[in-house]
Image (cartoon, rainbow, N blue to C red):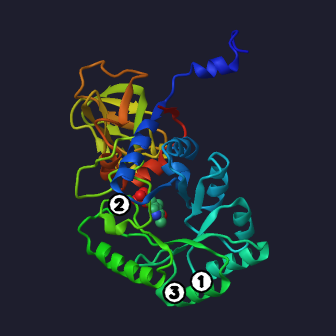
């Protein structure tokens, strides 16, 4: 008890240092837009806690929109997600299963992406041991050299599956390296590879396109597509303006304001020196909140449509912005500025930081209060 208030009431009255608003209506609208674009099943990629936005909330919202295929990266993510999704949902593990994880994966009913002959063999052995069919997805490397069965293992995988017969293959999958670049020749090259694989594995269906791949056209779609970034409002392709609805908004509190004369050093290392009298505001956003240090002296935040440049280095928990352009006294202790919102999309913020929207989303810190709407 503090002055008669219980702790819960006290905490609920504390003004947030930032508010991250996640628009689940926009998530649903984006998902259904993708569904309209393809005759394929649309799986949602909810790895890394749904790109940082909350796999539980996002997963449930997508489920209510009719989504029942979900991809995560780690087996552990699959176990957590399974607890919150309806049992009809299929959950696929992109990174595959480490040796020894097969029985746990099988018993939970999670479906691995089989990325090599060895993983396929181990999955077949688990099916033998459990004496029941265990479905899987075969991933092939078509030019990214990251994950997937290499060309010289294809024949052995096909032979193994023919003799074993207890691992039904739901899809033959691959991943595009340059799908967001509509005119990149690598897309056609990977498609050609994929077509060759699909003729060898003609008895199963193709799962090829990520968000960018969906926008490359129907010949990339196959039986199921896998979308992450487009669902979360990021730009999926470079050949049209982003058609997806923004999902994320981030507003951050001003924690101090000051005026400094010309010649004043600002921030770590004194890298920024005021050229003239400046008004500054320090806000509660730093690299520990997912605002990359590369935004130092490059990025900006917004207040009522005014661009407020970041000056000096981004710190762990704060950064300083130039508010000289605003009338004196506009911003004060407790005012909120826009970091992501109508004036600055996740793609624009990412571009200023020299990165991609994916990295911005998955880094957004957990210190802000979250509002789902
Ligand atoms: C992350 C990932 C996706 C989702 O990609 P987006 O570009 O976000 O749609 C799809 N497939 C694989 C294999 C992935 O790793």
Left or right: 325 as drawn, with respect to 113: left
Q: Residue at x 28, y 36 (%)?
A: 343
Which quadrant would residue 366 be assigned to in this image?
Answer: top right
As drawn, the residue found furthest toward the top would be 4
What is the secondary structure assignment of the residue under circle 1?
helix
Location of residue 132 in the rendering, given as x and y in whole percent from the top left corner: 73, 71
Label whose residue precedes the other's in the sequence (2 or 3) = 3
Q: Residue at x 24, y 20 (%)?
A: 327
Residue hosting label 1: 117
- Distance, label 1 to label 2, CA atoms, is 28 Å
Label whose residue precedes the other's in the sequence (1 or 3) = 1
Left or right: 302 as drawn, with respect to 17: left
Q: Residues within 10 Å of mark 2 (few under 14, many from 20)?
A: many
Label whose residue precedes the other's in the sequence (1 or 2) = 1
Residue hosting label 2: 214
Q: Residue at x 49, y 81 (%)?
A: 201
Left or right: 348 as drawn, with respect to 21: left
Residue hosting label 3: 154
Q: Residues within 10 Å of mark 1 (few under 14, many from 20)?
A: many
Q: Quadrant of the N terminus?
A: top right
Count every numbered label the image shows and give the total. 3
- Distance, label 2 to label 3, CA atoms, is 26 Å
Q: Residues within 10 Å of mark 3 (few under 14, many from 20)?
A: some
């Amino acid at each position: 008890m503090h002055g008669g208030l219980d702790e819960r009431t006290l905490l609920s009255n504390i003004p947030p240092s930032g508010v991250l608003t996640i628009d689940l209506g926009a998530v649903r609208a984006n998902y259904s837009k993708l569904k309209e674009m393809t005759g394929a099943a649309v799986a949602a990629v909810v790895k890394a806690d749904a790109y940082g936005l909350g796999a539980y909330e996002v997963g449930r919202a997508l489920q209510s929109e009719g989504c029942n295929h979900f991809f995560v990266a780690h087996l552990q993510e699959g176990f957590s997600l399974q607890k919150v999704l309806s049992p009809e949902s299929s959950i696929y593990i992109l990174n595959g299963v480490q040796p020894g994880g097969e029985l746990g994966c099988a018993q939970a009913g999670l479906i691995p992406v089989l990325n090599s002959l060895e993983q396929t063999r181990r999955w077949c052995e688990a099916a033998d041991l459990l004496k029941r069919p265990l479905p899987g997805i075969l991933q092939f490397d078509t030019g990214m050299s990251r994950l997937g069965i290499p060309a010289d293992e294809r024949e052995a995988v096909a032979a193994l599956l023919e003799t074993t017969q207890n691992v039904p293959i739901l899809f033959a999958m691959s991943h595009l390296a340059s799908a967001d670049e509509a005119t990149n020749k690598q897309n056609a090259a990977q498609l050609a590879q994929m077509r060759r694989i699909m003729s060898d594995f003609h008895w199963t269906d193709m799962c090829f396109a990520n968000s960018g791949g969906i926008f490359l056209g129907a010949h990339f779609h196959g039986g199921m597509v896998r979308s992450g970034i487009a669902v979360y409002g990021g730009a999926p392709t470079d050949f049209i303006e982003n058609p997806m609805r923004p999902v994320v908004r981030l507003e951050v509190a001003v924690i101090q304001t000051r005026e400094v004369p010309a010649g004043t050093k600002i921030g770590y290392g004194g890298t920024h020196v005021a050229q003239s009298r400046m008004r500054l505001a320090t806000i509660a956003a730093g690299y520990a909140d997912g605002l990359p240090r590369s935004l130092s002296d490059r990025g900006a935040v917004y207040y009522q449509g005014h661009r407020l440049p970041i000056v000096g280095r981004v710190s762990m928990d704060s950064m300083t912005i130039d508010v000289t352009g605003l009338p004196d006294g506009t911003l004060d202790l407790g005012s909120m500025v826009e970091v992501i919102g109508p004036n600055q999309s996740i793609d624009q913020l990412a571009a200023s930081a020299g990165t991609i929207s994916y990295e911005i989303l998955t880094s957004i810190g957990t210190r802000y209060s979250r509002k789902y709407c």
